[in-house]
Amino acid sequence: MALAISMTASQPTIPRYYDALDFPSLWKEFPPVPEFHESVARMPVADLRALQERRFLEQMERAWQIPFYQRHWGQAGLKPCHVKGLADLASIPPFSVHDLRDALARNPPWGDFMGIDPERDAPIPLVLQTSGGTTGLPRPMLYSPRDREVMNIITGRRLYMQGVRPYDLVQVMLSLGLSNGGFLAREGIWKYTGAVPVMTGTGAQTPTRRQIEIMQAWKTTQLAAFPAYLRHIGHVLRDEMGIDPRSLGIKGLIVHLGMDDRAELEALWGAPVYDTYGTNECGSLAADCVERSGMHIFEDAFVLEIADPDTLAPVADGERGVVLQTTLFKHFAPLVRFNSNDISSMAPGTCACGSTHRRLACIYGRADNMVKLRGTNVFPEAVGALVGEHPRANGEYLCVVEQDPATGRDEMTVRVEAERPAADGPALRAELAARFKEALGVKLAVEVVAAGMLDPLTGLSSASKVRRLIDNRPKEAK
Ligand SMILES: [Zn+2]
């Protein structure tokens, strides 16, 4: 009877995901693999630019409907008639995460950049994920069915480019909470590669020893994780369990490599490392192909520019700068010249794989993590790359910046881990300090601690993002 009573009440409209999209049409617009490889990936450059032009103008039309852009562009005096194509891109004022935070504070809880009002608009099925967020409340992002599906298609493309094939088992050791990385990997693997996602999550979700047992028992074929965690698991296997990680037969390591040591990880696991560039707003933007000579940008879905970190003016090809992101497919929260603060450069030449899509060299670091010490820009990621090269350090590190109360100067101390800190500490300290001075051009202090000591501070085995910088300077000095 209870059922009969509830059925007579006014019926809510339940939006169904599979009714929300015309999948075959979407796959023509944004081909999944393997079709992608024979079509869009090899498109003549002129055709690719024409496709970008068309999608860019559609994206601008959509963005002009959204209060955030009306306000941001209106304040700069920009009018719709000013932008006739990609040639006018540089005239559009960029925005950053500070503008997004401001919009969230102004219009909680979703901000006014989504272009949707869940209380007023007709219901559609939504996905909610967030930024990794190391401090404060993470930034939420809502995805429409189409936006999410394009991101899934692209995730499938990049994993296929990195060797994932049907019936492979991809062990995803990324956070399975609010942050986007883990769930997006699952959707992309499951829907568009034919492989099977094995969602063990971070070390906080599945302890390292259990991760290893699963790897061995089910014979997982690829590992998706942060490089630091892959190094940690490799060391546990080798040093604590007496097992050579290479004996596990892993076919590929799928990571956000940044400045981490590719050769060291590849030697440890006996498997190629594939670099990827992704964010919670966009999903995967660029990824290594099998050649591993720079990350192909998915140019049918994004326009990426490299700009001077201070002036935001475009830099010459090959020069380093911040990545400005423009999306070509998003209905919710489209991005037009979003300053990601990620430092990269365009890789020169063409790739042997035959793809015509341009490549990012790598992500060198984050502009907002950059510390200016006596006129020299220091990136924690660059420090980490040097720590990773030293045979007696285990690769873990944390940079701490403080103001010396006596001199008023900013000083950075790099804490590194060693397996035998008492025996190796003094030499390691001296050698690393000399190496920093030589490679970075600035003097850094070095502190050596025992293996595992930095974990609670960096969040290596528990957080979705590993913390590499603690800035203890008084606010006005930063
Ligand atoms: Zn390639």
Image (tube, helix red, strand yellow):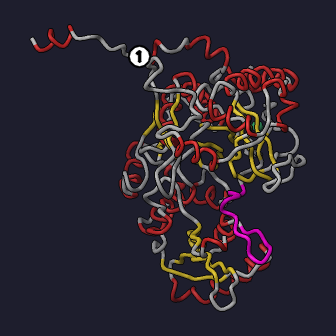
Residue located at (40% from left, 46% from top) = 200
Q: Is residue 23 above or below residue 255?
A: above
Q: Is residue 147 left or right of residue 385?
A: left
Q: Residue at x 68, y 40 (%)?
A: 287
Residue indicated by mark 1: 15
Q: Among all residues in the image, which is located at the extreme right?
A: 316
The crowding category of the residue bearing disc 1, from other C-alpha atoms within 10 Å (few below 14, some 14 to 19, many at least 20), is few
Q: Image quadrant of ligand 1?
A: top right
Residue 124 lies left or right of residue 256; in this view the side is: left
Percent position of residue 345, x then y: 80, 49
Q: Quadrant of residue 300?
A: top right
Image: magenta residue range? 364-378
- Which quadrant, please, contains the C terminus? bottom right
Look at the picture and state if 316 lies above or below 23.
below
Q: Amino acid at mark 1?
A: Pro
Q: Is residue 369 magenta?
A: yes
- Which residue appears farthest toward the left when viewing the image? 1
Q: Residue at the spot x=51%, y=60% of the render?
A: 234
- Image position of 241 (left or right of 59): left
